């Protein structure tokens, strides 16, 4: 039987490039991480949305 690792929200928000996709990992309240796969166009749209609400 394989050992199971606990899922924690510890760690920073991070984005890595895997092939043609960008993988974004975001720690969430209550533990765990939200993992989102984006392509370059979706990442650009997300950036525009975030800049619009953070100014």
Image: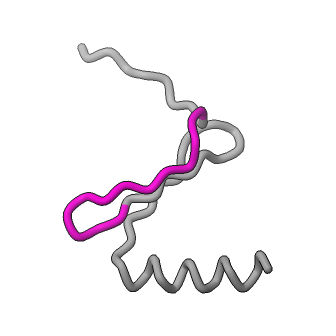
Colour option used: one colour
10 over 24 or under it: above or below: above
Question: Is 9 a magenta residue?
Answer: no
Residue 53: image quadrant is bottom right
Q: In the image, residue 55 lies at what x, y percent? A: 79, 80
Q: Residue at x 38, y 65 (%)?
A: 37
Q: Residue at x 39, y 71 (%)?
A: 38
Q: Which residues are magenta?
A: 10-22
Question: Is 21 a magenta residue?
Answer: yes
Residue 4: image quadrant is top left
| Residue 41 appears left or right of 9 | left
The one of 1 and 17 positioned closer to us in this rendering? 17
| Residue 51 appears left or right of 4 | right
Q: Residue at x 42, y 22 (%)?
A: 5
Q: In the image, residue 18 lies at what x, y percent? A: 25, 58
29 over 3 or under it: above or below: below
Label count reads 0
Q: Name, please, the residue furthest toward the left.
A: 19
| Residue 7 appears left or right of 21 | right
Q: Residue at x 59, y 85 (%)?
A: 48
Q: Name, please, the residue furthest toward the front.
A: 55
Of the 4 image quadrants, the one containing the N terminus is top left
Q: In the image, residue 31 lies at what x, y percent? A: 63, 37
Q: In the image, residue 15 lies at what x, y percent? A: 44, 56
């Amino acid at each position: 039987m394989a050992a199971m690792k606990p899922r924690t929200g510890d760690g920073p928000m991070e984005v890595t490039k895997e092939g043609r996709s960008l993988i974004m990992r975001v720690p969430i309240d209550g533990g765990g991480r939200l993992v989102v796969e984006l392509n370059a166009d979706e990442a650009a749209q997300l950036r525009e949305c975030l800049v619009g609400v953070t100014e």
